[in-house]
């Protein structure tokens, strides 16, 4: 049912929230964000092994759990709330979804079980230095060579690109443009000619890398020249997943702002008793609830194969991005002076809010996309 | 099987309707039959024109009415609020005298709560009721009174004691509107319509037996009315669907609906008319403007997520879960939608936004949207009051200290003109 979670889904959420509260407190977030790979291997093992989260939306026939995008969305909402530092979005959301959408049966059987088990960390490289997550943004070329391909070009903003074991790369036939000639390739992390450089990021909890390809050997995945559809579908699912991650962070910020306003005494009373705070709080609640609605609705639409899915994905991405950023701005403001200190945790989500707003396309981009997709 | 079993109720209702429903009957005659049988308000007590069925059975009976196109009791306007308030707090005499004629549609009611000096702060009413001899004498002014010029009776909140705190000095009365001390004038709004009235009360009289509850109980009784108002906010629309069938009873009902709905003609415009946005953007050619497209997209996202958020609230209710935060936000979100829609509509219109009436786009509908929308965030609880309600009841934030509730109302600062 599209407007309510089932009891099982609510239980899954509660269990995951307890796990993440235990494993990803902000002390851990702060420790891991200073590291280059930004991930605790033990937590990753538990998360993929005991909890099976890395396998959540992968079908059972490929070693997955066989759940849907709604369950994936719940996992991400909780991870966004906890600011979990891990290559989950890169591997399970981006790479696994791309393989599911583009790969042949044999390729799915070969590639997905390791990702599902968390033993292989994969990522997806689409955007380049132009920062476009669409077919037009892909300039890297794939040239046939001895029955396989060699990739030339530069990918940027690649999530966990410097640490992933395997990279799914979008590249095009030389001379092609737009949707034509687009293919997806599998590149090993240690492939010859591949230079991986971690980028300095505004949001240290979300690791990005630039990948330079100089005649890098690559294996074609799926149909040569037929990747435009699978890429678009993958980006839609990723946008929905990110929207769910964002509403988790937004709700956490909202709650922390409320907690602080309830505790902070000024002029002899809690600042939460001032109407200026209460009205802001009411507006924040409206904002975050509308964003949750959009994120949940789009996730359900993905599971139901709703023909409106592409428009709904963009709708959810735009709505959640705006709400998250607003929540972060208000939460710092409500905290007053302490709100912009390093020791206060709010800036961790503030930075994540901005990186999430821009990643996969900003709200204005997605609003325009939504209009085109609705063809209204 | 209990007598409240759904199938039993459905079968009984169906049998009774098949026996009695006749579209060539007059509306009044039919409704009297409904009142006599209890099928008009099946969840009301048996003693008072109902059948004592559980509330959950009312929709079952309703479905049986709809199945054969049978008309129900009169439910539009303020009358149901009056009926439910009297049912809970009224004396047997009140119920005897008023309930039947409310349900048959013979009597029309209005609500005399708001005053020029108190809108959001309803408990600050200063309309005065003084007991002189064996009559209550009423003096003061009420406002925003829908249908006051047609109403036979008014639900009146008036102050009977100025030396106790504000909520304790109010008393609830039934006012006979057809008397010399009651003067009704239309209140013209900025959009040109006059859907409400101002009611001036100058030595209007009320016999003591038309007090509802005791003296000083007024706020408690008014709360019942207001809670029902909130609960039944959508019932006006629900029951106002006229049938186009030719039979006598439908013709009479069409006339009734037209009269009741007359003040609400501009209400769709007040909500912003998001439904017209795309059509307007296309016909004006503004659809190609990327800035306008962004604004339209923002509006569509807002309006669709608003609709889905309301459905989330209903889904939670249907599953028997406690209502989440999403259930209390609708009124405030509706204001956002309306305001945004009005802004986008006028942007799409360009210079034509300066025009009105038949010179303006869609024969003035667009300009009517712009000048009707401001009411949306004020009527029925301002956005500011909604935010107070959300922050205090949903978010449990502390109330602001008040200076008006713990001292005699006489000493509370009030508007110079009230």
Image: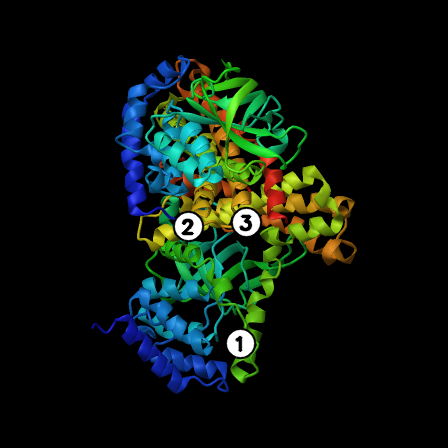
User: Mark 2 — residue?
Assistant: A2
| In-image side of A68 versus A372 (left or right) | left
Closer to us: B383 or A314: A314
Q: Which chain carries label 3?
A: B
User: Mark 3 — residue?
Assistant: B116
Taking the view exactly as shown, the residue that stands out farthest to the left is B1
Q: Where is residue A329 in the image (x, y as percent from the top left)?
A: 50, 25
Q: Position of residue B353 (x, y in %)?
A: 74, 47
* Dot 2 and dot 3 within a common chain: no
Density class for disc 3 (Cα within 10 Å; few <14, some 14-19, many ≥20) is some
Say if mark 1 contacts mark 3, CB within 8 Å.
no
Q: Say which label, 1 or 3, has the lower sequence index.
A: 3
User: Mark 1 — residue?
Assistant: B253
Which image quarter holds the N terminus of chain B? Answer: bottom left
Frontmost of labels 1 and 3 is: 1
Closer to us: A119 or A78: A119
Q: Where B91 sits versus B39, above or below?
A: above
Give the CA separation, mark 1 to mark 2: 38 Å
- What residue lies at 33% left-to-right and 17% top-to-bottom? A27
Give the CA separation, mark 1 to mark 3: 35 Å
Density class for disc 2 (Cα within 10 Å; few <14, some 14-19, many ≥20) is some
Mark 2, secondary structure of its residue: loop
Q: Residue A118, located in which quarter of the rendered image?
A: top left
Q: Which chain carries label 2?
A: A
Res. B398 in view: no
């Amino acid at each position: 049912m599209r407007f309510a979670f089932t009891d099982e889904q609510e239980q899954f959420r509660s269990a995951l929230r307890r796990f993440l509260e235990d494993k990803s407190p902000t002390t851990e977030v702060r420790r891991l964000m200073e590291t280059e790979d930004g991930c605790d291997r033990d937590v990753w093992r538990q998360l993929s092994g005991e909890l099976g989260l890395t396998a959540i939306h992968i079908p059972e026939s490929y070693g997955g759990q066989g759940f849907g995008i709604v369950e994936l969305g719940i996992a991400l909402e909780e991870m966004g709330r906890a600011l979990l530092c891990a290559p989950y979005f890169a591997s399970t959301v981006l790479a696994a979804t791309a393989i599911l959408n583009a790969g042949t049966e044999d390729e799915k059987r070969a590639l997905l079980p390791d990702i599902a088990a968390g033993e292989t960390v994969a990522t997806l490289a689409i955007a380049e230095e132009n920062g476009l997550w669409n077919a037009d943004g892909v300039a890297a070329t794939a040239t046939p060579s001895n029955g396989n391909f060699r990739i030339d070009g530069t990918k940027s903003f690649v999530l966990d690109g410097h640490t992933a074991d395997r990279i799914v790369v979008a590249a095009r036939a030389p001379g092609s443009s737009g949707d034509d000639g687009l293919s997806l390739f599998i590149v090993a992390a240690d492939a010859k000619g591949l230079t991986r450089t971690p980028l300095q990021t505004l949001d240290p909890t979300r690791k990005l890398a630039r990948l330079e390809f100089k005649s890098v050997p690559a294996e074609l995945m799926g149909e040569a020249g037929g990747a435009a559809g699978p890429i678009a579908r993958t980006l839609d699912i990723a946008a929905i997943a990110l929207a769910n991650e964002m509403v988790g962070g937004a709700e956490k910020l909202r709650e922390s702002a409320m907690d602080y306003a309830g505790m902070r005494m000024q002029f002899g009373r809690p600042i939460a008793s001032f109407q200026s705070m209460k009205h802001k709080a009411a507006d924040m609640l409206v904002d975050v609830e509308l964003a949750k609605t959009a994120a949940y609705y789009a996730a359900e639409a993905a599971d139901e194969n709703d023909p409106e899915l592409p428009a709904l994905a963009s709708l959810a991405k735009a709505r959640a991005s705006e709400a998250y950023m607003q929540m972060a701005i208000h939460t710092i403001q409500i905290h007053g002076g302490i709100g912009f200190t390093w020791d206060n945790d709010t800036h961790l989500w503030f930075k994540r809010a901005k990186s999430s707003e821009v990643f996969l396309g900003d709200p204005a981009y997605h609003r325009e996309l939504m209009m085109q997709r609705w063809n209204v | 099987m209990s007598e409240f079993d759904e199938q039993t109720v459905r079968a009984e209702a169906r049998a009774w309707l098949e026996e009695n429903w006749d579209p060539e009957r007059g509306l009044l005659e039919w409704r009297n039959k409904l009142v006599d049988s209890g099928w008009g308000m099946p969840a009301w007590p048996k003693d008072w024109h109902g059948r004592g069925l559980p509330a959950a059975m009312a929709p079952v009976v309703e479905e049986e009415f709809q199945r054969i196109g049978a008309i129900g009791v009169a439910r539009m306007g303020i009358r149901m609020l009056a009926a439910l308030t009297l049912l809970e707090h009224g004396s047997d005499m009140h119920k005897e005298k008023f309930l039947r004629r409310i349900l048959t549609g013979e009597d029309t009611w209005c609500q005399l709560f708001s005053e020029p000096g108190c809108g959001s702060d309803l408990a600050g009413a200063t309309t005065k009721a003084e007991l002189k001899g064996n009559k209550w004498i009423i003096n003061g002014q009420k406002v925003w009174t829908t249908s006051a010029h047609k109403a036979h009776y008014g639900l009146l909140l008036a102050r009977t004691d100025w030396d106790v705190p504000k909520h304790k000095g109010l008393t609830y009365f039934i006012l006979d509107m057809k008397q010399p001390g009651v003067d009704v004038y239309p209140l013209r709004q900025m959009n040109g319509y006059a859907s409400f009235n101002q009611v001036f009360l100058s030595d209007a009289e009320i016999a003591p037996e038309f007090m509802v509850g005791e003296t000083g109980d007024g706020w408690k009784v008014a709360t019942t009315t207001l809670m029902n108002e909130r609960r039944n906010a959508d019932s006006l629309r629900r029951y106002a669907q006229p049938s186009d069938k030719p039979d006598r009873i439908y013709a009479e009902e069409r006339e009734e609906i037209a009269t009741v709905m007359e003040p609400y003609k501009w209400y769709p415009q007040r909500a912003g008319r998001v439904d017209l946005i795309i059509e307007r953007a296309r016909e004006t050619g503004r659809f190609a403007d990327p800035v306008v497209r962004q604004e339209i997209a923002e509006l569509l996202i807002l309006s669709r997520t608003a609709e889905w958020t309301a459905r989330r609230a209903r889904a939670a209710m249907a599953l028997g879960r406690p209502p989440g935060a999403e259930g209390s936000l609708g009124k405030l979100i509706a204001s956002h939608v309306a305001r945004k829609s009005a802004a986008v509509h006028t942007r799409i219109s360009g210079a034509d936004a300066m025009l009105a009436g038949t010179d303006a786009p869609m024969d003035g509908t667009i300009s009517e949207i712009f000048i009707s929308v401001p009411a949306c965030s004020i009527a029925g609880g301002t956005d500011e009051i909604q935010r107070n309600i959300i922050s205090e009841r949903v978010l449990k934030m502390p109330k602001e200290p008040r200076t008006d509730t713990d001292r005699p109302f006489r000493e509370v600062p009030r508007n110079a003109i009230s």
